[in-house]
Image (cartoon, rainbow, N blue to C red):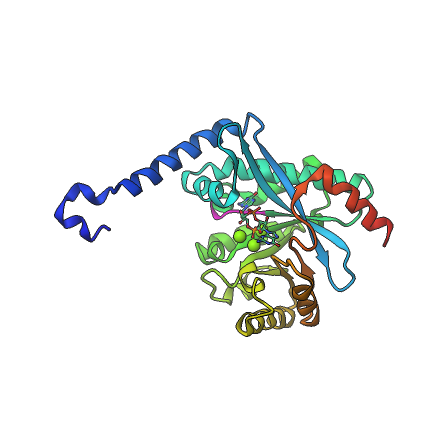
Amino acid sequence: RSKEGGRNQLSFFTPEMDQAVQERALLDHEMRLGLPAGQFELHYQPLMRMPDGQIRGVEALMRWRHPHLGNVSPAKFIPVAEQTGFIAALGDWGLEQAMRQAKAWADQGIEGLRVAVNVSARQLMKQALHERVRELLAQTGLDPSLLELELTESLLAENVEQVNASLSAIHALGVRLAVDDFGTGYSSLAYLKRFPIGKLKIDQSFVRDLISDPDDRAIAAAVIQMGHSLGLRVNAEGVESEDQLAQLRAMGVDEVQGYLVGRPLPAAELTPRLLSDRAGA
Ligand code: C2E
Ligand code: MG
Ligand code: MG
Ligand code: MG
């Protein structure tokens, strides 16, 4: 559109852009009010260990219920929070909640349940995240090995020196690191040997058509093989069918996540399943 703008200089700001800017400003404003008002909540999705099928981890996923806007998807509000900088406060709140919940589960006798938390680039760079993690580990008393931070490839490609320092410090605390949405970002792969990564999560876009699309199958198989050669564990996201599960199992995947295993739920609704999973083990 900016190319057409020669006709009228003011048309650089198109109505569509104006609307997007306004919506972003609105969401930002509402998030800043909504966080202290208790509109945010974490849901937890089970991570199923393979091949024994046990639930040894959960991923914390943010939910926002606004009184008038209704449920706003994190796919919508997280990018806005990243753009405006609010992700620093929001992410910190989420990290603390997830760590408290992880400790609560450990205290309830659900041993060895690891909680994964998504971390944005802005959150990693803006504050000294390793210092905050150290502080929260001390405050909550959580075993560091029960915390995993999920990072995206694009994050790993930026400010390599700073990211490396930050991740090394977090790793030194005993906290695990995973690469989320693997295969969708700009990936040099060099970061896999540079950073102390423990897990790759194959993006759900490769899992969706795993059965019908040989290319997706080839990519998934290659990621699993490469991951294992590098000593990494490999998760597959977005598993919705038994066929997908069987295929991934045959390929040797280490962990699956998706609606087939369980949808993200409030902690209180997931706890009975976590308890019975342990009892049956
Ligand atoms: P993600 O980290 O890749 O999380 C997985 C997403 O896939 C979640 O979407 C989850 O609900 C969804 N999902 C799980 N299983 C299935 C399945 O079988 N089929 C399909 N179609 N989808 C499935 P959600 O909760 O909407 O979150 C979207 C994204 O928002 C997350 O992707 C993550 O990038 C971001 N996000 C969520 N919570 C946080 C947070 O606390 N901090 C940060 N920085 N980002 C977050
Ligand atoms: Mg994730
Ligand atoms: Mg993902
Ligand atoms: Mg994602």
Counting from the top left corner in percent of width and height, residue 80 is at 43, 41
Magenta residues span 118-122
As drawn, which residue projects farthest toward the left?
A: 7
Which residue is painted at 48% across and 54% down in the image? 155
The mark total stands at 0
Quarter of the rendering containing residue 257: bottom right
Q: Position of residue 44 (x, y in %)?
A: 66, 44
Given residues 147 and 193, the one toward you in this image is 147
Q: Nearer the viewer, residue 27 or 168?
A: 27
Residue 119 drawn in magenta:
yes
Residue 117 on the magenta span: no
The residue depicted at 59 percent of the width and 38 percent of the height is 94
Q: State the quadrant of the C terminus.
A: bottom right
The residue drawn where x is 73% and y is 42% is: 270
In this rendering, is residue 60 above or below 196? above
Residue plotted at (73% across, 37% down): 268
The image shows residue 6, relative to residue 105, as above or below, that is below
State whether residue 66 is above or below residue 196.
above
Q: How far from the left and from the top, in percent, is residue 100?
A: 69, 37
- The image quadrant of residue 82 is top left
Is residue 85 visible to the viewer in this orientation of the structure?
yes
Q: Horizontal and vertical percent for residue 276? A: 83, 47
66 vs 43, left or right, is: left
Query: Is the residue 167 above or below the residue 88 in the image?
Result: below
